[in-house]
Image (cartoon, grey):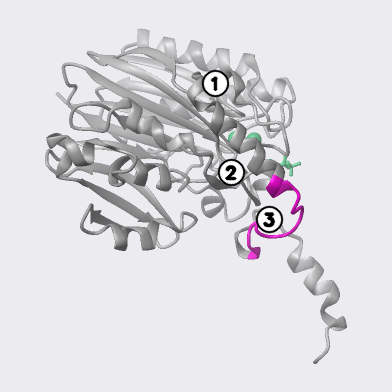
């Protein structure tokens, strides 16, 4: 019987400012997930924090888009918001964009990444948790994992990966999707996914077996709300080993601190720093953006783990690189390419300043 691993996440209040999550909110998340396991809704579940976001990792047999599982996550975020309000945490309930749950968490603010799978005799998975960046940030790492032989040796030398992977790409503005097959369509794929603000990789599938290899959350808060409410801070789930890239091939892309959008006021480019969960508290210029990776072995749907995968000195260089890149970009202050282009900024005073200065412009 297929099982589902659902990661549903939201920022329901920050401590202090947008830097981290208060332990009481996390404790409530853990308690409620444990209760859902006891009540039989979930086979297993855990709650974790990356920066100011709460990530619910839920294993169940209710299928993707399960109303019961989504409703549970929504109610938990509402209860967590009450704790955040009591403690006057910053931006309590900020990602909860609708007044009431109506069947599915998608379109309501929280992000979701769900994988349906037939559990293999051994099922290693990695759950990635991002903070201070946008949906689409996984485009480049997914490309490296599933299409770049300089990253993933198995694409060249392992029979089980050699048939390539298919990428399901979402146009987040037009609400359309397309599937592109790698390796033969990589040039076409890159035309789209090289622009992550518009095109986000939702799913990757092993073409030889049809199995889902990876899923990311592509929910765009600003497009749902029609205004800036906070960054998407995406999640991803990646299956590893055998017919998928090995754990080390899945983590290898993060030995580079890729530049992503987000950082201060969601309006700057900054380096995506891989850190252990204990260091995923973006405090400098509300950043640099963070990525944490929790590894699990699934055993009859139980989550054996986590192992904190970036708690490894082999990512020290990437962290040092992130700090160097952040120093360099920060020197640009309000100038592009540190600041995002005008139409991508989440905060702007442009309409007001343009209106105030309108009469002062003259023909040259
Ligand atoms: C980034 C983020 C923060 C805030 C910033 C200002 O995703 O959430 O950088 O944008 O701290 O927050 P406000 O406007 O609430 O004072
Ligand atoms: Mg926040
Ligand atoms: Mg956040």
The answer to if 58 sits in the magenta stretch is: no
Instruction: Tell me the element at label 3.
Output: loop
Q: What x and y, as percent, mark residue 276?
A: 53, 21
Between 106 and 130, the residue placed more toward the observer is 130
Instruction: Tell me the element at label 2.
Output: loop
Between 150 and 136, the residue placed more toward the observer is 150
The residue mark sitting in front, 2 or 3, is 3
Position of 317 with respect to 138 (left or right) is right
Mark 2 lies on residue: 231
Residue 274 visible at all:
no
Mark 3 lies on residue: 339
Q: Earlier in the sequence, mark 1 or mark 2?
A: 2
Between 61 and 333, the residue placed more toward the observer is 333
Q: Residues within 10 Å of mark 3 (few under 14, many from 20)?
A: many
Instruction: Give, as a single range, the part of the protein colored magenta.
Output: 328-342
Rendered position, 330 above or below 173: above
Q: Earlier in the sequence, mark 1 or mark 3?
A: 1
Q: Quarter containing ligand 3?
A: top right
Main SS category, magenta section: loop
Residue 144 visible at all:
yes
Mark 1 lies on residue: 277
């Amino acid at each position: 019987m297929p099982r589902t691993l659902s990661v549903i996440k939201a920022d329901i209040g920050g401590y202090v400012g947008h830097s981290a999550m208060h332990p009481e909110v996390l404790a409530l998340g853990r308690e409620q997930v444990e209760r859902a396991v006891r009540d039989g809704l979930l086979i297993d579940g855990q709650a974790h924090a990356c920066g100011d976001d709460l990530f619910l990792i839920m294993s169940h047999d209710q299928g993707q888009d399960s109303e019961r599982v989504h409703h549970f996550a929504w109610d938990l975020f509402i209860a967590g918001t009450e704790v955040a309000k009591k403690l006057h945490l910053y931006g309590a309930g900020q990602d909860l964009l609708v007044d009431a749950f109506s069947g599915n968490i998608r379109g309501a603010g929280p992000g979701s990444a769900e994988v349906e799978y037939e559990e293999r005799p051994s099922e290693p998975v990695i759950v990635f948790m991002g903070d201070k960046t946008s949906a689409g940030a996984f485009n480049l790492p997914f490309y490296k994992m599933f299409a770049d032989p300089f990253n993933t040796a198995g694409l060249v030398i392992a029979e089980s990966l050699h048939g390539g992977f298919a990428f399901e790409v979402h146009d987040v503005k037009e609400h359309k999707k397309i599937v592109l097959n790698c390796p033969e369509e990589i040039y076409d794929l890159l035309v789209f996914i090289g622009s992550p603000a518009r095109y986000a990789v939702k799913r990757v599938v092993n073409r030889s077996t049809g199995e889902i290899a990876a899923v990311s959350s592509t929910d765009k808060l600003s497009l749902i709300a029609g205004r800036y409410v906070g960054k998407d801070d995406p999640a991803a789930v990646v299956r590893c080993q055998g017919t998928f890239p090995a754990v080390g091939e899945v983590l290898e892309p993060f030995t580079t601190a890729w530049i992503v959008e987000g950082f201060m006021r969601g309006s700057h480019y900054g380096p995506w720093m891989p850190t252990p969960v204990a260091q995923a508290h973006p405090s400098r210029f509300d950043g640099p953006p963070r990525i944490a990776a929790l590894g699990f072995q699934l055993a009859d749907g139980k989550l054996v783990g986590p192992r904190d995968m970036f708690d490894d000195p082999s990512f020290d260089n990437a962290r040092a690189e992130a700090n160097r890149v952040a120093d360099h970009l920060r020197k640009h202050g309000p100038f592009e390419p540190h600041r995002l282009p005008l139409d991508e900024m989440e905060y702007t005073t442009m309409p007001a300043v343009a209106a105030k200065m309108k009469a002062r412009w003259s023909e040259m």
